[in-house]
Amino acid sequence: MAPTVVLLPGDGIGPEIIAPAVQVLDAVGAKFDYAEYPFGGASIDAHGTPLTDETLAACESADAVLLAAVGGPKWDTTDPDKPRPEQGLLALRKGLGLFANLRPVRPLPALYDASPLKLDVIERTDLLVVRELTGGIYFGEKSRTEDRASDACVYTREEIERISRVAFGAARSRVTSVDKANVLETSRLWREVVGALHGREFPNVELEHLLVDNAAMRLISAPRHFDVILTENMFGDILSDEAAMLTGSIGMLPSASLGGDGPGVFEPVHGSAPDIAGSGAANPLAMFLSAALMLRHGFGMEAEAAAVESAVDRALAEGLRTRDLGGAATTADATQAVLKHI
């Protein structure tokens, strides 16, 4: 019996890029049983909530979850009583216990000219952002009155230790732990716990601590400095999107969200791009690369994952450029260019 993969197309360009990803998976011989469910804004429209109990249960029983994109201006609201698509993402992460978000950032030589940064700054950059995903200010207690609002930022020693182990385990040489320890008590605990764990369990990996503002500057001025960036939820959200621009387009960045024994969620970093939805112009490459991360981290299918990544690299080297990369290739063009190299 084939493993089960739940597909969450979501909103905007999501349905347009998830179907080609299944084509790519089929082409490398990865056979799965797929089940598709509404998620995000599409689920709000259909069911009044961004994540139904049925969808969450299906994800919990699956072997992996492939998610495309959520959100859009249709569902934007500041009313705390109205559902937002992004709430579905947070609930899915919490429900599946996905505490570790991995975002590899490796500018491809074929796309060096697409980055707004100079060649001598970005070339040979190969870093991984490891973001804590279920704690911090996004999940803290919230309050709101007409004149006052608050969001609590809370971290425990256990939460910091488990995400730190992921980062140290992934490092080739160095972990850069990013915090705001000159201001925040949560960051002071973070720095203390990361340092103690390093000394006890990972003394052979170099550890440095950087304040988040310094890290943001160095990510642009000297990205080759980084091997693994370890950080908390909100800082990781911001820094990983900043790092996306090293690749020339946020449309090129995949991600994996992992937890304990349950299924992981694999999704491109970009949003739902409602401005181009339905035009056939969406860049599916980050979706393909997210599928490759699913093969690698979800199923241990290293050869198949490498085949997808190599096909993307070769298609770009041959000149494939979608609109976000300065070209005119459509979603279908990009899909065929990748399939040609599998």
Image: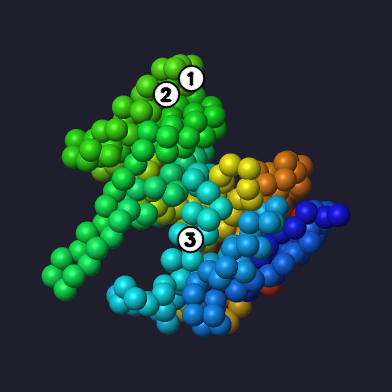
> Does residue 330 appear in the picture of this structure?
no
Q: What residue lies at 61% left-to-right and 78% top-to-bottom?
A: 280
Furthest residue toward left: 147
Q: Callout 1 environment at 10 Å: few (<14), some (14 to 19), or many (20+)? A: few
Determine which quarter of the picture holds residue 37.
bottom right
Q: Earlier in the sequence, mark 3 or mark 1?
A: 3
Q: Callout 2 environment at 10 Å: few (<14), some (14 to 19), or many (20+)? A: some
Question: Where the N terminus falls, by quadrant?
Answer: bottom right
Q: What residue lies at 60% left-to-right and 74% top-to-bottom?
A: 38
* Closer to us: 50 or 107: 50
Do the CB atoms of the residues marked 2 and 3 lie less than 8 Å apart? no
Helix or strand or loop: what does disc 3 sit on? helix
Say above or below: 61 vs 177.
below
* Closer to us: 95 or 188: 95
Q: Amino acid at mark 2?
A: Leu
> How far from the left and from the top, in percent, is residue 104?
53, 44
Q: What residue lies at 56% left-to-right and 46% top-to-bottom?
A: 258
Left or right relative to 312: residue 237 = left
Numbered mark located on residue 264 in the image: none
The residue that disc 1 covers is 201
Marks 2 and 3, Cα distance to the nearest angstrom? 29 Å
- The total number of labels drawn is 3
Q: Earlier in the sequence, mark 2 or mark 3?
A: 3
The residue that disc 3 covers is 91
Q: Amino acid at mark 1?
A: Glu
Q: Amino acid at mark 3?
A: Ala
> How far from the left and from the top, in percent, is residue 81?
34, 76
Mark in front: 2 vs 3? 3
